[in-house]
Image (cartoon, helix red, strand yellow):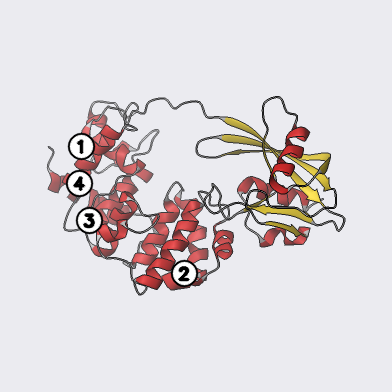
Amino acid sequence: MKHQEEFSHLLVSWYLENKRDLPWRETKDPYIIWLSEIMLQQTRVDQATPYFFKFTEAFPTVCDLAKAERQTVLMLWEGLGYYSRARNLHDTAKFVCDNLNGKFPDTYSGLLSLKGIGPYTAAAISSIAFNIPRAVVDGNVIRVLSRWAGISDDVSSTKTKKEIQQLADEIIDSSQPGDFNQAMMELGATVCTPVNPNCEVCPISGSCTAFITARTDSIPYKAPKKKVPHHQIVVGVCRNEDDLLLISKRPEDKMLGGLWEFPGGKVEAGETFEEALIREFEEETGLSILVENKITEIKHAYSHFKITLHAFYCRSNGSMPISKEGQELKWISRSELFDYPFPKANRKLTEIITKD
């Protein structure tokens, strides 16, 4: 194996000289590091940074976050996506504040036991905050190490991921694991990019197998993904005689749990949009509705599927809605729409209808 000390020295020296000035990098506070790491899961730095500032201003400590209302947390998170992160963040803050006197565990295993913290996040927090030599492996690290070691197998396979994790654990610098882990992530994010990596400025290109053998375009290799499903979704902006709008709260244990939306659902085979909307309203709320004009179509992509959301104005029959699926239902005015957290596609819809 290539010499560990040389690899680490070149990598960390490059990092200390070239690292981006990010707000969570100048602290050893595990709360701040945990908050940033959760936000950076599945999210680019430029997207996460304004949310980081909003959260740290609203919740300077973990107990401030613990004491917040769930809806307040979700409102501040709105637009960042992957909302289970926000729910887990809130639950973990409560646990740390109520059961651990507001102090995060200072061991890898202790961190790993907390809700929403997996091996990567536990390794990041423990190495940066507590100097524990646990190697992080995310997409950036997989790309760097597969190229450096010349690993040409499918990096999306469990077997290859384990091989890369083992390699990372072997080469981590035990004297400065936090800087080493951040250097690996930084290199993957800024130099060893998926397309057109900037190998000329890479500190480890001299020992990188993919660079030496001109295979940076083929490593890392990922097997082709399956076709992403595309669903047709219909929702109703339903008005009553007082011109109030009906919204529905998604169950906590479902996708987008705790957020609000306009009632509706998936269009079944053979249904028109109007028929699907009438059926969904009956199933969800017990209301018989009159479907009026179509408002808009909104396309949106989630991690594993895509949707086209078809929105209609509709009128209720004047009866009270009944929650048939256990969700909370509310009649609210248009001006109150921005007091509730909505998923991105529904939020786009609220912005359209409040301009009418």
Please name the residue that numbered disc 2 is placed on.
Answer: 66
Q: Are marks 1 and 4 in contact (CB under 8 Å)?
A: no
Q: Using the numbered discs, state the Cα–Cα distance from disc 1 to disc 4 in whole angstroms.
A: 21 Å
Earlier in the chain: of badge 2 and badge 3, it is 2
Task: Pinpoint residue 323: horizontal percent, then vertical percent.
Answer: 68, 52
Amino acid type at circle 4 is: Asp
Question: Callout 3: few (<14), some (14-19), or many (20+) C-alpha neighbours within 10 Å?
Answer: many
Q: Quadrant of residue 194?
A: top left
SS label for mark 3: helix
Task: Pinpoint residue 155: horizontal percent, then vertical percent.
Answer: 32, 32
Amino acid type at circle 1 is: Gly
Please name the residue that numbered disc 3 is placed on.
Answer: 177
Earlier in the chain: of badge 3 and badge 1, it is 3
Q: Left or right: where does residue 91 sit relative to residue 79? A: left
- Labels 1, 4: front one: 4
Earlier in the chain: of badge 4 and badge 2, it is 2
Q: Quadrant of residue 106?
A: bottom left
Amino acid type at circle 2 is: Ala
Q: Are marks 3 and 4 in contact (CB under 8 Å)?
A: no
Please name the residue that numbered disc 1 is placed on.
Answer: 206
Earlier in the chain: of badge 1 and badge 4, it is 4
Please name the residue that numbered disc 4 is placed on.
Answer: 169
Question: Callout 4: few (<14), some (14-19), or many (20+) C-alpha neighbours within 10 Å?
Answer: some
Q: Using the numbered discs, state the Cα–Cα distance from disc 1 to disc 2 in whole angstroms.
A: 48 Å
Q: Left or right: where does residue 348 sit relative to residue 151? A: right
